[in-house]
Amino acid sequence: MNRILAGIRPTGKLHWGHYFGVLQNWVELQKNYDCFYFIADWHSLTTEYANTQKIKTWVKEVAKDILAGGVKPENLFLQSLVPEHAELHLLLSMMTPLGWLERVPTYKEMRQELVDKDLNTYGFLGYPVLQSSDILLYKANKVPVGEDQVSHLEFTRELVRRFHFLTGKEVFVEPQPLLTQSPRVPGMDRRKMSKSYGNALLLDDSPEEIAAKAMQTLTDPARKRRTDKGNPDVCTVFDYHKLVSDKETIAWSDKGCRTAGIGCVECKKAMAKNAVEYFKEFREKKAYWDGKEKQLFEIIAEGSKRARKVAQATMEEVQEALGIKYGL
């Protein structure tokens, strides 16, 4: 069976973008693949190294979100509980050309986006090597990515070829992208959905919070009055209807907007009502973990034991290939 490796950085509770763009795919993939899904707490340190006191809370919240979203507990692990990730990162960094790191697209993008953080660090520059190590430890055949992330995976493939060339040993599998079709989920202000922008709908938002955020969500900016006809194609509320509403409601919203048959407030209320119902089961499943932190981390630890067995076997081969396996 082909193996899947995918991870997510814990930077707080997950939002709709994570659910429709990541979690739904993870749940489907585990039906047909040997899956390893991890919470990348070390990756959080690349940008949050000065804010570490929150990481444990973030890990807990993300774990609860992932399990409530339908991921099997045995498929979930925590990056820092598998120290082989750091070991392979170190060894691969010895042979990674500096120029490869500087040309990674997100290196420049994140430095421009996160202007409030000092990202002139060794860890941030080298995060693609850690990312590659995450994948290669498990000899993952497939990595679920969007089209905009294929270039990142190519970095890992290049690193595999370089390792094999320098050592003369075939240790790793060259991972292939598994292109995933995910709906675009804009933030309430039509920018990228992000907690840092304050435009995110969280998966465990209460009915009251969903209703309040729906009222703040942008609609067609050209529709100034109730009697103006609108364009749902540029309306964020309509984007959300396509995620949480049934076909009849989506058609009602589309036609009502274009003909001015309904007003924006009416449309927002309908979307909020459907969103509350859509995420009702999720909220209940997440609430199950309230007050059960010990049990939650025990589950994470068990999943990490499964992952570490695979990682240790790979590191035996890596050490042998590099000539640093001494048999002691």
Image (tube, helix red, strand yellow):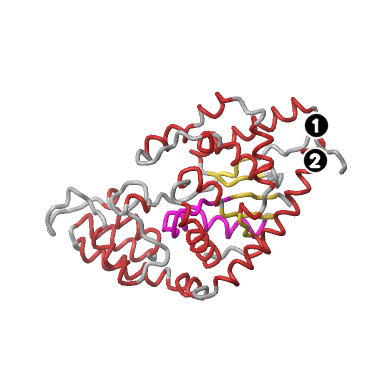
Q: Crowding near pointer 1: few (<14 within 10 Å), some, many (20+)?
A: some
- Name the residue tied to disc 2: 317
- Name the residue tied to disc 1: 169
Foreground pick, 79 / 17: 79
Callout 1: helix, strand or loop? Answer: loop
Q: Identify the residue at image location x=54%, y=47%.
A: 180
Residue lying at the far right of the rendered structure: 327
Magenta highlight on residue 24: yes
Identify which amino acid the numbered label 2 is placed on. Glu
Magenta highlight on residue 91: no
Query: Mark 1–mark 2 contact, CB under 8 Å?
Result: yes
Residue 38 falls in image quadrant: bottom right
Foreground pick, 194 / 48: 48
Identify which amino acid the numbered label 1 is placed on. Lys
Stretch of the chain drawn in magenta? 7-32
C-alpha span from label 1 to label 2: 9 Å
